[in-house]
Amino acid sequence: MHDDDPISNLQPYFESLEKAGLAEVKHHELKGDTFIDLTIEGIRFRGFVCSEGPCIELKSGGVPSSVQLGVSSINRCTPTFCCDNTDARWFVAKYHTQGHIDVHALSDTGRRRLAYEFGLLIHANKRLPFSVSSECDAFYGSKAFRALQAWAKAHPRKIRRFQANVYLGDWPTLAEFGLTIRRSSNSAGDGA
C-alpha cells in the first residue's frame, strides 16, 4: 500500500528541484477566484478556479494564456506539437504536446520554481528518473494545491459550486475539506 502513495513518490522530484536551485519568487495579494498569484523572474503567473477546474495563467511577460492544472507539465514543444528539434521552446503544455503558456523567457531556475510552486513536472521529452504517476499527483503535492485548500476554506460557498473533472477527480471536495493524499508510508489510517 505505501508504495502506491503518489505524494510520497513525488518527494524526490520536489527535492531534486530544490537541490538544483530555485529562482526567487514574489507572492501577490489574492483577489476573487485566484488561489495563488506570484512573480518569477519578472513574469507573473496565477492559479485560479473556473468552470473547468483549477488553472494556471500567464498574467504578464507574454501573450496571456491559461491551461488546466492536473494535465499540464513543462516541456520543450511548439505551440501545436512537441518535438525534439531546436525550434522547440519551453511551454506549460497540456498532454505534453499542446504548448499553452510560453515560459521560454524563464531561466532553468525559474522553470524549476514554476514547477515547484504549481506542481508541474518538467519533462523535456525525457523520462523522469522518479516514480511519478501523473501530473494530477504532482498538483496534489504542490504549494498551489495547499493554496487552493486555503482559498476553499475562505470561500466555502464558492468552492461548492464546482464539480469534479476528468483531470483532478473530486478536487473541490479535497480542497474544501482540507483532505490530502497520505504523504508518508509511516502514516496510520486516516486517524480521525
Image (cartoon, rainbow, N blue to C red):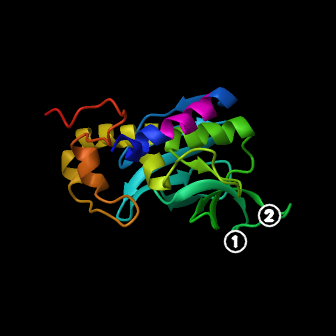
Q: Residue, x 72% and y 43% (percent of image)? A: 106
Looking at the picture, tell me which residue is in the foreground, 102 or 136.
136
- What amino acid is labelled 2 in the image? Asp
Give the CA distance from mark 2 to mark 1: 10 Å
> In which quarter of the view is residue 145 placed?
top left
Can you name the residue that lies furthest to the left here?
A: 192
Residue at the disc numbered 2: 84
> In which quarter of the view is residue 85 placed?
bottom right
- What amino acid is labelled 1 in the image? Phe
Q: Is residue 121 left or right of residue 4?
A: right
Q: Residue, x 51% and y 49% (percent of image)? A: 132
Looking at the picture, tell me which residue is in the foreground, 190 or 91.
190
Q: Nearer the viewer, mark 2 or mark 1?
A: 2
- On the image, the x and y values in percent for residue 56 come to 50, 52
Q: Is residue 15 magenta?
A: yes
Residue at the disc numbered 1: 81
- On the image, the x and y values in percent for residue 151 come to 31, 41
- Quarter of the rendering occupied by the N terminus: top left
- Quarter of the rendering occupied by the C terminus: top left
Q: Is residue 67 magenta?
A: no
Stretch in magenta: 10-18
